Amino acid sequence: MKKVTLSLLICLGLAQSGFSQKKDYQINAVAFYNLENLFDTEDDPKKFDEEFTPNGANHYTEAIYAKKLLNMSRVLSEIAVEKIPDGPALIGVAEIENERVLQDLLKQPKLKDRGWKIVHFESPDARGVDVGMFYNPKYFKVLDAEALFVDIVENGKQQYTRDILHVTGLLGGDTVSVFVNHWPSRSGGEAASAWKRKKAAAICKAIIDKKVAENPNAKVILMGDLNDDPVSPSVAEVLGAVGDKDKVKQGGMFNPWMSFFKKGIGTLGYGDSWNLFDQIVISYGFVNPQNAGWHFYKAEIFKPSYLISNFGRFKGYPHRSFSNGVWIDGYSDHFPTYIYLIKENK
C-alpha cells in the first residue's frame, strides 16, 4: 500500500479536510467504468448479441474487438496512477458480455503485469451484458460474492436486466461491502421507467440497512451506471444519498457527485445536455471522522483529452466506440469515475 509522505500531504491539501499534516497516510482508489458494449465476436444463441458479430449490424470483427480491448486497457491502466502507480484497488465495470472479455482485457500489454483478479457472474440481461469487478489482491481480499437478481415485471411480463454484483472483502484491514450496478435504462422515458431503478436501488438499500444495523460505521461502496443522476429519486430518496458529507447521518450515504452535477458536469452527454449516471456512493463509515480505517478524500472524473470527441455531433462528449453502426476507434460513451481513500498509518 502506498504511503503518503508529508510533502505529498501538503500537495493533496489534506489539512483542509481536517487531517493533520504531521501524520502519515496510505492512499488508495476505487473506480467505475462503463466499457460500452465490450462483446466478443461470437454469436451466443442465448443472447441478443448478433449486432456485435462479424456479420452483424456493427460488422464487429476480430480486428475491431482487438482494438476495443487495447483502447479499454489504456484507460483502465491510467486511472488514478498520478497518485497510485498500481492503480485502483477496485474497479467496477459494466456493459461487458461475459468473463472471457474481462480475461482478454487483462491480457493486454498495459494490464498484464498488474496482477488484477476478476469477480463476475453471468446475468440474465436480454442483451447479454453484465457487470463485473477487477481487484488488486495486494490491496483487496475477496471474502464473499453474490449476484442479486432485480425482479422487474411489467404488464405481467418478466423483464431481464443486469444482476447487481455484491462483493464483501478486506480493504487494507477494513471489511468493505461493494455493490456494482447497472440499473435499468430509461427506455420508454425517464419518469415512466423510474420505478425500475427505484427497485434496483431498494435491493441494495435493504442489504445496506441490515449491515448498518449490525455496525453503524459499516463501510459500503455502491458504484455503477445508475441510469439516473445524483438528484434522481432512486439515488436521493431510496438510497438517501446526500451531497454534503458533513450532513451525512449514521446509516446515511454520501454522494460526492452531487456537487459535480449541480455545476453541470457529467459523465455522458445526450441531446445537448450532460448526465452523471456513473456514480460511486459511500456509507457514513467512510466520512465519520471518529471512525478508524479508510476515509473518503476526493472524487474525480477521468477525462484526458483522448477520451473526448473533437468533432461531429458528439463533440465535447466521451469518444465512443461506434457512431451509427460504424467503428470510430473510440473508447466508451461514458467517462470513468473514481474516488480516493486515505488511511492514517499508526
Image (cartoon, rainbow, N blue to C red):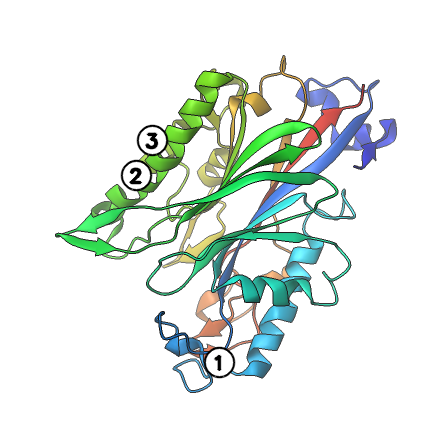
Dot 2 surroundings within 10 Å: few (below 14), some, or many (20 or more)? Answer: many
Circles 2 and 3, Cβ within 8 Å, touching? The answer is: yes
Q: What residue type is labelled 1?
A: Tyr
Give the image location of residue 308, x and y in percent: 57, 62
Residue at horizontal 69 percent and vertical 28 percent from the top: 173
Considering the image in quadrants, where does the N terminus appear? Answer: top right
Can the viewer see residue 324 in this picture? no
**Cβ–Cβ under 8 Å for marks 1 and 3:** no
Answer with left or right where residue 102 lies relative to residue 20.
left
237 or 8, nearer to the observer: 237
The residue wearing badge 2 is: 198
- The image's mark for residue 238 is 3
Residue furthest out toward the front: 144
Element on which disc 2 rests: helix
Q: Name the residue under label 1.
A: 60
Measured as percent of width and height from the top left, residue 232 is found at 34, 38
In which image quadrant can residue 160 be found?
A: bottom left
Residue found 39% across the figure and 77% down from its top:
51
Q: What residue type is labelled 3?
A: Val
- Sequence-first disc among 2 and 3: 2
Q: What element carries label 1?
A: loop
The residues bearing labels 1 and 3 have C-alpha atoms spaced at a distance of 39 Å
Query: Marks 2/1: CA distance?
Result: 34 Å
Which of the two discs, 1 and 3, labels the residue nearer the N terminus?
Answer: 1
Name the residue: 39% across, 82% down.
Answer: 57
